[in-house]
Amino acid sequence: MFPTDPRQMQQLLRQMGIKSKMVDAKRVVIECEGSNIIITNPKVMEMNVKGELNYNISGDVSEEASVNEEDIALIMEKTGATREKALQALKENGDVASAIVALSDAEA
């Protein structure tokens, strides 16, 4: 059974020849196709196993849709909205066409 105490875990890893250290991180973002995984309050352990670095990450996980900068630029161009308003409309409406319609209706 693996120990849950970080000190005991580091001691066990050292005995196996694995060097490890804690990384001071505020937030971890994993960029995926179509979304981002956000880990807040992360506990990140860096492990060096035979010259290869591995990272073990735990914390509060949330997921958000990733935003394409070209989509934001198109919304801004078609509506004259600021970047912030275009981004907000895209997040609220889910797609470029709906965001453009929403911003156009808001101006009318």
Image (spheres, grey):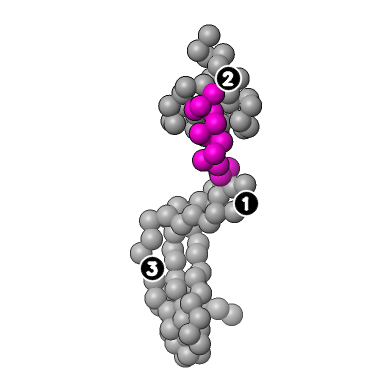
Residue 33 is marked as 1
Residue carrying label 3 = 23
The prevailing secondary structure element of the residues shown in magenta is helix
Question: Looking at the image, is mark 2 or mark 3 nearer the viewer?
Answer: 2
Question: Looking at the image, is mark 3 or mark 1 nearer the viewer?
Answer: 1
Regarding mark 1 in the picture, which secondary structure is present there?
loop
Between residue 20 and residue 94, name the one nearer to us: 94
Residue 45 screen position, x and y as percent: 44, 71
Between residue 29 and residue 14, name the one nearer to us: 29
- First in residue order: circle 1 vs circle 2: 1
- First in residue order: circle 2 vs circle 3: 3
Q: CA distance from mark 3 to mark 1?
A: 26 Å
- First in residue order: circle 3 vs circle 1: 3
> Is 47 placed left or right of 99 in the picture?
left
Q: CA distance from mark 2 to mark 3?
A: 43 Å
Residue 102 is marked as 2
Instruction: Report the span colored magenta.
Output: 64-78
Regarding mark 2 in the picture, which secondary structure is present there?
helix
User: At 49% across and 70% down in the image, what residue appears?
Assistant: 55
User: At 51% across and 34% down in the image, what residue appears?
Assistant: 73
Q: CA distance from mark 1 to mark 2?
A: 26 Å
What type is the residue that disc 2 sits on? Ala
Rate crowding at label 1 as few (under 14), some (14 to 19) or many (20 or more) other CA atoms within 10 Å. few
User: At 57% across and 13% down in the image, what residue appears?
Assistant: 105
User: At 44% across and 87% down in the image, what residue appears?
Assistant: 14
Between residue 18 and residue 86, name the one nearer to us: 86
Rate crowding at label 2 as few (under 14), some (14 to 19) or many (20 or more) other CA atoms within 10 Å. some
What type is the residue that disc 1 sits on? Glu
Q: Residue furthest front?
A: 77
Residue 6 is marked as none
What type is the residue that disc 3 sits on? Val
